[in-house]
Amino acid sequence: MYVVKSPLPEAALKTVSEALQGALVDLIDLSLVAKQVHWNVVGPRFRSVHLQLDEVVDSARTHSDTVAERASALGVPPDGRAATVASGSGIGAVPDGWVKDTDAVGTLVKALGAVITRMRARVEATGEADPVSQDIFIGITADLEKHHWMFQAENG
Ligand SMILES: [Fe+2]
């Protein structure tokens, strides 16, 4: 069912919609992982790491909404269902239970690194197909790389 007409030709739309959908599941999972660690972190640096994690949650939620709505604007229905996120996310499993502050930071360095690698691939993939979507991926990547830097500095 086509409700919203896409401004893009079919081949370009396929490339861009795959990139947007992939970004959506990565970003939703990033928000969930950051909350999981936010609740379970323990240790002497609890407060700073706990608060820093919510900054990632805020960013990931904002960016997930941006990519989902970009898909909608291109006429592609975004899929943010739990099962879709679980099967499509590029972030590996995170441990359950309490997590020491240094491990919490390590978990975020790894999770952000995985999402950034995939986001940079989306920047590469979408430049020709749709520079408007590429611009969104570039902005998101810059923000995620800022968070990535800060978590790496935490364990420096
Ligand atoms: Fe909280």
Image (tube, rainbow, N blue to C red):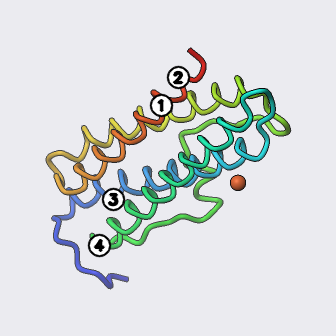
Query: Three-letter amino acid code at disc 4?
Result: Ala
Q: Position of residue 124 (x, y in %)?
A: 24, 38
Q: Nearer the viewer, mark 4 or mark 2?
A: 2
Query: Three-letter amino acid code at disc 3?
Result: Ser
Circle 4 is placed at which residue position?
73
Sequence order check: which comes first, mark 4 or mark 1? 4
**Camera-nearest residue between 13 and 30:** 30
Q: Residues within 10 Å of mark 2 (few under 14, many from 20)?
A: some
Residue 152 image label:
2
Left/right placement of residue 24 relative to residue 35 reads: left
Q: Is mark 3 within 8 Å of ligand 1?
A: no
146 versus 61 height, above or below: above
Disc 2 + disc 1, Cβ < 8 Å: yes
Q: Is mark 4 within 8 Å of ligand 1?
A: no
**Where is ligand 1, by quadrant?**
bottom right
Query: Three-letter amino acid code at disc 2?
Result: Gln
Determine whether the residue tagged by mark 4 lies in a helix, strand or loop: helix
Determine whether the residue tagged by mark 3 lies in a helix, strand or loop: helix
Q: Residues within 10 Å of mark 4 (few under 14, many from 20)?
A: some
Question: Residue furthest toward the top?
Answer: 156
Residue 37 image label:
none
Q: Position of residue 31 (x, y in %)?
A: 58, 51
29 versus 67 height, above or below: above
Q: Residues within 10 Å of mark 1 (few under 14, many from 20)?
A: many
Residue 148 image label:
1
Circle 3 is placed at which residue position?
17
Q: Nearer the viewer, mark 1 or mark 3?
A: 1
